[in-house]
Amino acid sequence: MAETDAAKPQGSVGEVFRAFLILGFTAFGGPVAHLGYFREAFVARRRWLDEAAYADLVALCQFLPGPASSQVGIALGLTRAGLGGALAAWLAFTLPSALLLVAVGYGATAFGGLDSGILHGLKIVAVAVVAQAVLGMGRSLCPDRERASLAVAAAVLLLLWSSPWAQILVILAGALFGAFWLKLPAKPTGAPLPVTVGRGAALACLAAFFLLLAGLPLLAGAGELQSLALFDVFYRAGALVFGGGHVVLPLLQAEVVPPGWVSNDLFLAGYGAAQAVPGPLFTFAAYLGTVSAPPNGWLGAAIALLGIFLPAWLLVLGTLPFWNLLRGRPGAQSVLAGVNAAVVGLLLAALYDPIFTSAIRAPADLALAAVAFGLLAFWKVPPWLVVVLTALGGGGLAALD
């Protein structure tokens, strides 16, 4: 496919796979925490892209339905090592949790005895990761009082109005604020993103996205092929849900429990296990595919997993080339600056709810989160090691109770 940018990917597929595989085993805490892990790994440490370019990717994926953190990961792999890098990033970040949840599906309650203290420690480390991301991105993307005020206003709105649509509204408001009130230099604020997907291919991906969205229900309803019906359910879930993994769970429950594909007890057991594994929560689809009515097992898991993530692929490949063109235009810089400030506000709100509220239950929890933050921000300890230490710390605190 023809390249849309003069800059070419500077990394290798193996490099991308190794970097994301570490995150696939250690990135606990949900999509917002994942964005913090990505920023630390690829902006702060490896310097694959600058702060402004990363914020642009986050803003784009917040606009799109589906798993935002996985979409950012696909985009990072694509800009680093082309389509092979995108595939490597997705596989490395997704397979660890998917395989774990397939194993849970075969055992039904295999994670029932997971130490609750360790699980709580994994929630605590997400507080430190997101706090570091908010601090770093705030310094870079909100350097003046106008943008800092926008970020605070965005956070206030999101804290008072808890809805996936509120995120879209905040980003749109940030764009309007930037267009009318921010006057920035005409030069681009971020380095060009190397995207090896041509605009023709991008339009084909967008066409495929809408064609499958409209056509799969018709095909599934016209035939009796259970595998096609299963693929249709998970494709629609991945294509229509804004707000990340937790938002998709009620939709999936309504699709797989009433028809008898999965019992409610099995559904809830899998949901509990999904909270205990790293990586994207959308890999819960692999569990549901494993325990569903035939096709089930490995085949069901593969169908469900491909179905729920395919929309993310089509949307990223279909929009990133045009987004790259837009962000390079001098007239778009004020708009993007407003959007980036709104993204900081979005992360700030998420730091409190659901990250802080679900993790910090006692002064000892806050103390452990502060230690984790210090290790990340001041001592530059690798995030995976901080995850391990904080999980063990959570287990230790539970033993003392």
Image (cartoon, helix red, strand yellow):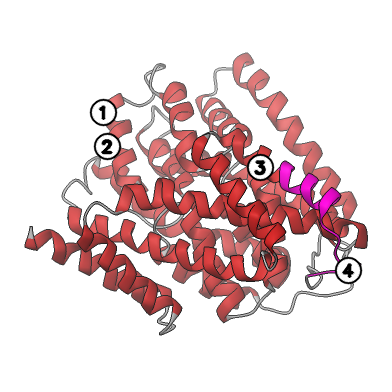
Which mark is nearer the camera, 2 or 3? 3
Whether residue 57 is visible to the viewer of this picture, yes or no, is no
The residues bearing labels 4 and 3 have C-alpha atoms spaced at a distance of: 24 Å
Question: Where on the picture, by quarter, is residue 38?
Answer: bottom right
The crowding category of the residue bearing disc 3, from other C-alpha atoms within 10 Å (few below 14, some 14 to 19, many at least 20), is many
Q: In this view, does 323 lie above or below 64?
A: below
Do the CB atoms of the residues marked 2 and 1 lie less than 8 Å apart? yes
Residue 265 numbered mark, or none: 1
* Badge 3 element: helix
Residue for badge 4: 185
Q: Mark 1 or 4, which is nearer the eye?
A: 4
Q: Earlier in the sequence, mark 3 or mark 1?
A: 3
Residue type pointed to by label 3: Val
Give the extent of the magenta segment.
172-189
Q: Circle 1 — which element?
A: helix
> In the image, what residue type sits under mark 4?
Pro
Give me the C-alpha separation between circle 1 and circle 4: 57 Å
* Element assignment for label 4: loop
Which residue is drawn at the image coordinates 52% and 39% (left, top)? Answer: 303
Between the residue at mark 2 and the residue at mark 1, the CA separation in whole angstroms equals 6 Å
Q: Is residue 380 above or below residue 254?
A: below
